[in-house]
Image (cartoon, grey):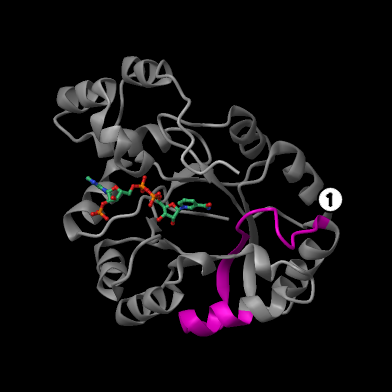
Amino acid sequence: MDLAPVGLGTMGVDDPSVVAAALDVGYRHVDTAQIYDNEAVVGDGLAAGDREDCVVATKLWTDSLAADAVRAGTERSLDRLGLDRLDLLYVHRPRGDYDPATTLPALERVRASGLADGIGLSNFTLEQLRTASDSLDDIAAHQVEFHPFFRDEALLDHAQREDYPLVAYSPLAGGLVFEDPTIQAIARRHGTTPAAVAIAWVTSYDTVVTIPKASSRAHLEANLGAARLKLAPEDIDAIEAIDREVELFPE
Ligand SMILES: NC(=O)c1ccc[n+]([C@@H]2O[C@H](COP(=O)([O-])OP(=O)(O)OC[C@H]3O[C@@H](n4cnc5c(N)ncnc54)[C@H](OP(=O)(O)O)[C@@H]3O)[C@@H](O)[C@H]2O)c1
């Protein structure tokens, strides 16, 4: 699946005008989830803007993953979003009612019936990804935590080898990157912000795209433009040397 380097994360977004503004400034990938309890808000924002060519993604929560619940859960999300079809439908977390042998075939049936274009996975381990590959025609994307303080090398490697997008969530570590002296120094050298440096670093990897959450038009525009920032090899080396031990969303 072709995804723009920067999309919009909407966890905590409760105002449709944020989504409409994102479309207006050029976002072409909007990410929500059942558990964010804002699919209707996101749907209102999509309806208020020009959503042509915009990838809309949502995620089935763990209580919609039993084989006989997948289709009804997808239909509820579509209804709240005001859409006939999702571009990307994820398994949010492989737990609760998740069973690869039954959940994934149910998702493939949803896809075959035209309700979703691609099936994505989120928060899977390498082992769980390998098992899932046996039951899915194609992994449309894998969405995982990825920022200067956390990255799973094995998952990055799998996405690059199998050639599907790795969607990096919480690229700003929810705001922690703003306080980091290494990232602050790189930002000063480039005359930009720590947010832009973190987004440029994440999107510098092949097949990695990201979905920072932002509320203001200024943040939306800055984040979209950040993927164009070219970091020097020494900047990348300095970020690579940061200790990566802050996982915001552990299993
Ligand atoms: N699959 C999963 O399990 C999972 C888990 C977590 C998150 N996600 C997805 O990833 C998205 C992003 O992650 P996140 O919301 O945890 O955190 P994030 O994107 O790392 O950080 C968001 C925070 O940074 C601020 N911000 C954004 N752009 C900024 C800028 N240019 N300058 C200064 N501050 C800026 C935002 O403030 P304002 O809102 O005030 O602009 C917000 O407080 C979520 O919305 C969700 O879609 C997925």
* Residue 31: image location, x then y, percent: 45, 61
* Residue 175: image location, x then y, percent: 30, 41
The image quadrant where one finds the C terminus is top right
Q: Quadrant of residue 188?
A: top left
Q: Secondary structure at mark 1?
A: helix
Q: Is residue 171 above or below residue 1?
A: above
* Residue 41: image location, x then y, percent: 37, 76
* Residue 229: image location, x then y, percent: 27, 35
Q: Quadrant of residue 71?
A: bottom right
Is residue 250 shown in magenta? Answer: no
Task: Say which residue label 1 marks.
Answer: 134
**Which residue occupies 28% across, 42% down?**
226
Other-residue count near label 1 (Cα within 10 Å), few / some / many at <14 / 14–19 / ≥20 = few
Q: Give the mark count.
A: 1
Mark 1 vs ligand 1: CB under 8 Å? no
**Which residue occupies 64% across, 42% down?**
163
**Which residue occupies 19% across, 60% down?**
217
Position of 74 with respect to 179 (left or right) is: right
Q: Nearer the viewer, residue 149 or 153?
A: 149
The image quadrant where one finds the N terminus is bottom right
Position of 218 with respect to 132 (left or right) is: left
Q: Nearer the viewer, residue 140 or 45?
A: 45
- Give the extent of the magenta segment: 75-100
On the question of residue 57 being in view, the answer is no
Is residue 83 shown in magenta? Answer: yes
Q: Is residue 245 above or below residue 75?
A: above
**Which residue occupies 43% across, 67% down?**
54
Q: Is residue 109 above or below residue 80?
A: above
On the question of residue 103 being in view, the answer is yes
- The amino acid type found where label 1 is placed reads Asp
